[in-house]
Amino acid sequence: MGPSAALPRGRAGEHGPRWRRPWRLLALGLLSASSVLAAAPGVGAMSREEKRRLGNQVLEMFDHAYSNYMEHAYPADELMPLTCRGRVRGQEPSRGDVDDALGKFSLTLIDTLDTLVVLNKTKEFEEAVKKVIKDVNLDNDIVVSVFETNIRVLGGLLGGHSVALMLKDKGDHMQWYNGELLHMAKELGYKLLPAFNTTSGLPYPRVNLKFGVRHPEARTGTETDTCTACAGTLILEFAALSRFTGTAIFEEYARKALDFIWEKRQRSSNLVGVTINIHTGDWVRKDSGVGAGIDSYYEYLLKAYVLLGDDSFLERFNTHYDAIMRYISQPPLLLDVHIHKPMLNARTWMDSLLAFFPGLQVLKGDIRPAIETHEMLYQVIKKHNFLPEAFTTDFRVHWAQHPLRPEFAESTYFLYKATGDPYYLEVGRTLIENLNKYARVPCGFAAMKDVRTGSHEDRMDSFFLAEMFKYLYLLFADKEDMIFDIEDYIFTTEAHLLPLWLSTTNQTISKKNTSTEYTELDDSNFDWTCPNTQILFPNDPMFAQSIREPLKNVVDKSCPRGISRAEESLGSGPKPPLRARDFMASNPEHLEILKKMGVSLIHLKDGRVQLVQHAVQAASSLDAEDGLRFMQEMIELSSQQQKEQQLPPRAVQIVSHPFFGRVVLTAGPAQFGMDLSQHKAGTRGFVATIKPYNGCSEITNPEAVKEKIALMQRGQCMFAEKARNIQKAGAIGGIVIDDNEGSSSDTAPLFQMAGDGKNTDDITIPMLFLFNKEGNIILDAIREYEAVEVLLSDKAKDRDLEMENMDQKLSENDSQKQNLEETTAGGSRDVGAAGEEPEEGAESSAVTEPGSSSAAAAASASVPPSSQDSHGTEESSAPEPACPPGDNQPQEQQAETEPNSKANWDNKGQPMESILADWNEDIEAFEMMEKDEL
């Protein structure tokens, strides 16, 4: 989860003098900032009544999600909002690592405990605590993620305990409570400790709740790698557990893991990699950023200082932050780099988890870059309705799914608290509207399978209830709306509340790690440690708006040209290195540049050419580095072009009563028939099952099919033959349902229907493919409602609000009928699709056509053929319009070495074997990045 933290306000006598007053100054300063900026021109101040209305809307949305979890899913870990049932591990198709968060311990309920109190639902909180105490078993024979179990379950229990104590002290609620949640947290803490049985102190990534790690029945303990965030996001929960219970071992283990990561940082760049070997401490993935795999490690260093008052954590954070702003931050972008070559970008896309970082920068006190990155992310959201899991530097979709992540809402909340600018209230309004418009379904809120089509996934993660509604409610709440002071707590990365008074309770650890050496930094980096509000918030009501203004069209109306680091350093000097997208194999000048970079061409028998780099043949180390970047770009371009050969997914949207467009199914396209991307209105009609059901012979019930969308089963003949038969019978479209029982887009890649090898121009109707589980949703709807109308389109359309409101009024006027939402929740059965898979790893050489441009050349690399009646290639990003040529063409970041490192190879004292090993590591890192999943 993305990091989250309340702005702390220390109480007298609770914290050391080093930090107490400055942090209190920040908290108090936010109030004055609000009063100054509330009247900022451009966005009018939001009335108290409107804020309260939006806050109440958030409460209603939470009730919709929470009540459906309790009604349809509890005691399961999570709700499947499309099929209105609980997700029980082992009873649903495996989703891989995502399922490691599920431990048969009623995950969503535990994760939601302190949210109930923040939202003033104290009665529901009391009932929920009693359920957790009575029903939850932590001794299950199941392998879970140490990271996820810590932040969601241990953090949830501790957060619940914290607010239970607060309510008990107030005297109105929880008078019976006697620390039961803390006892459960301690039990869970001991169950996680076996994971730390390594020589390094870094925990194994997984542990068996019943058998630990080394036990023969544990089914884990063979892993060698873990992510930096996985090992570095423990200190808040483990230290809180030690402080609450007086048992020091938990805090000691978490500190040891943090100490080890710090010692293993890359000393010249002060960056850390994404994954590390838990036994040797070697970096397995040497790319570094602020997104997936590292994010909350940085967050917990700063927050550990706030909660525990240990200066060493602040010094480490500031050291890392200096490196982040020096290498990774390229405003408004945050791009991954290599830890040992930090001027070399490791990828040309960003993942959505970095959306937490502006919020962390607010806590750091660095407001300007926080505003810039947040605004860039907001522009991406306005384009796609949600933040895609990954998007490119020119803001195209890279991974299209969106599991309702809360990180952007988190940063929005903190920026509003820091600036008081009503603009961020309007951003929050947009988030609420998009959730209700595109993600709300009868049984909760469904994750987005594809932000381009609007299709859903049968998934509502626990963090949606733990974080999203907490931040949105706090965004619109005034102090008098709260039953306690939120600034007496710090948020964990899962937005669980830990009280600041823990800093002076049961202190058993020395605050200063005297054995650790710190890199000497420019003192200016530490000016922000205790922010001065006069610097943070100038007496200029246009402060935040003036920073946002240059970025308002960064996504839609212009193609941003990121000045590369090499161009930046060269100024008007030598031309920048050759880019892969500009390369032409027939251009003699390009061939000469390749030779200088150590890249050679091999002519293949089929007329193509293969590019291979040998770093030792480069003219200089800088040229070799340019060649490495060129090869990386060519590999990425090849993969992207292969993906663009594939048709994008389509949508089947159920638009009739009682769905009204709320249920959207991911559908596979056909390589024949009507191209729905060229017919924006799509094809709308009622569905009918054909006879024979396989559609492989003349349709015997044409009267039932005429002017309708025909449903048929896959198999026994070619897809094109089915299409011709239903078209002849008068159908206006067709949906082929997979005959493989239980198949679902949850677990299978996108399927494309190919033609029959003949001319298919005679087929003019649209044809789409649904897997078995998605198809059964429509078949179940027919059995329950008889007349079912669907829309076949390239992307989901806005639901029919007019018909929905009319239906609600009719339902309200008829006392014999159930409430519309209850009817829908009981009747609609839907299955979305699992997250889009990242592209496969590419070879470290690229194959091109002679005389072709790079785009065409890369596309000529091996492209899997489409399937005729078997599963096709994986889902891919849809091609999007390219930027016009010229100065507005988006430029990827260039590589640059430090000035003193630009000497020729002959002047280098480094052994050749070491140099070759260095480049091989880079190639391996590039290949691994291609295979990496979020």
Image (spheres, rainbow, N blue to C red):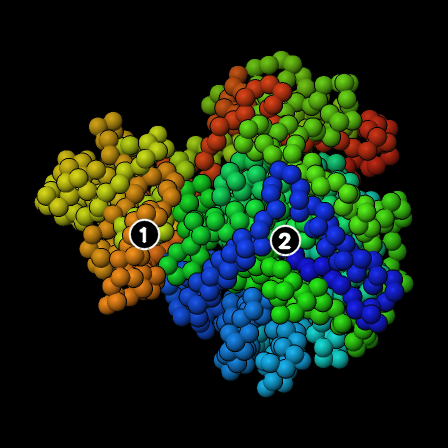
Amino acid type, label 1: Glu
Location of residue 547 (image quadrant): top right
Amino acid type, label 2: Tyr
The structure residue drawn at horizontal position 46% and vertical position 32%, both measured from the top left corner, is 879
Asked if residue 453 is positioned above or below residue 782 in the image, the reply reads above
Q: Depth check: give the residue in front, 38 or 127.
A: 38
Q: State the separation of the CA atoms marked 1 and 2.
A: 32 Å
In this view, the residue farthest toward the top is: 588
Location of residue 906 (image quadrant): top right
Asked if residue 457 is positioned above or below residue 763 in the image, the reply reads below
Residue 669: x, y in percent?
34, 39
Q: Depth check: give the residue in front, 32 or 557.
A: 32
**Left or right: 20 with respect to 880?**
right
Where does the N terminus fall, quadrant-wise?
A: bottom right
In the rendered image, is residue 71 in sight? Answer: yes
**Left or right: 74 with respect to 792?**
right
Residue 811: x, y in percent?
27, 60
**Left or right: 70 with respect to 709?**
right
Residue 345: x, y in percent?
68, 37
> Tags 1 and 2 in contact by the CB under 8 Å rule?
no
Asked if residue 109 is positioned above or below residue 585 in the image, the reply reads below
Picture disc at residue 804: 1
Q: Secondary structure at mark 1?
A: helix
The structure residue drawn at horizontal position 65% and vertical position 62%, both measured from the top left corner, is 479
For the residue carrying disc 1, how many other residues have a C-alpha within 10 Å: few (<14), some (14-19), or many (20+)? Answer: some
Q: Depth check: give the residue in front, 732 or 189.
A: 732
